Amino acid sequence: MSPHTPPSPHTPIIAIANHKGGCGKTTTAVNLAAELGRAGHSVLLIDMDPQANASLHVGRLHPSEVTADCAALLLGGPELLAEAIHEETALPNVSLIYGSLALGLAEDKLREESPRPAEELAQKLAPALGVYDVILIDCPPSLKLLSSNALAAATHVIIPVESGSQYGLYGVSDLTRHIEKLRRVNPSLRVLGALLIRHDPRLTVCRLIEDAAREQLGSLLPVRIPTSTKISQSVILKQSVHTVDGGSKVARAFEELAAHVAQALSLPRTAAR
């Protein structure tokens, strides 16, 4: 694949991106992957965060046990892709490319050694296009080279915003400028919308953040993710929130999010669960 060729439209690639920490990127990536998988879609989840929280949540192995991880893939050849994809995870129909602390070092090496340091992931993912129904990328809390690789490879972006925090939109203008910059190498990149996390419409701060997010980011996803202890429980148990309590408001919200994403991206229809 040419570095400037956009990803195949048959395999949407969604980057879950926001350089603000603690805004729900990993929670969104894991539970969106879980719900899309539960709906019968084949999902590849890529953990590009050196903290590897998505890998710790979803993977059967500890990231330290994995040699062919996302860092190795970025620095190696496309032949490493098959070895880097782990099909055995805690989530049905969800495969995983592990993150690790080595991603921090990989970022430095890419900057020094790669002729197109922001476009390595797009090239390495070429063999996976058309194999999976959808690919999700959990981005790190920064706007450096790892996030740039995710955005250069992606077809779409979801921006989680912490609705219950007065600082929920801190630095969002930097993020939107960064997305615009990456459109120079990936002109097909589209923002699906902001996703309000820990949202309670009864609270004034949440309503203010909702209005500000709509104004600054242009569009909001139609689903709001409420605050819930089920999310923390799911992390401890290494399960999706649906597995912890499928009848909870937060589980239903992620199910609605997955249904919206599947419709918006025209994912292939699946058999009834």
Image: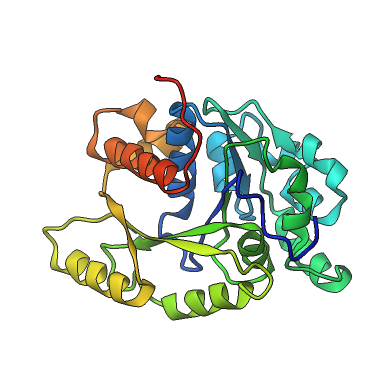
Could you tell me which residue is drawn at 31 percent across and 40 percent down? 256
Q: Is residue 110 left or right of residue 197?
A: right
Quarter holding the C terminus is top left
- Front residue of this view, candidates 234 and 173: 173
* Left/right of residue 55 with respect to residue 260 in the rendered view: right
Residue 38 visible within the image: yes
**Residue 130 appears in which quarter of the rendering?**
top right
The percent coordinates of residue 44 (x first, y second) are 61, 39
Residue 143 vertical position relative to residue 251 in the rendered view, above or below: below
Expressed as whole percent of the image width and height from the top left, the position of residue 238 reads 48, 32
Judge whether 149 appears above or below 69 on screen: below
Provide residue 258's location: percent of width, then percent of height: 40, 41
Q: Is residue 153 above or below residue 115?
A: above
Q: In front here: 202 or 233?
A: 202
**Residue 197 appears anywhere in the view:** no
| Image position of 177 with respect to 237: above or below | below
The residue depicted at 27 percent of the width and 44 percent of the height is: 228
**Residue at point 52% right, 57% down?**
156
The image position of residue 172, as x and y in percent, is 43, 75
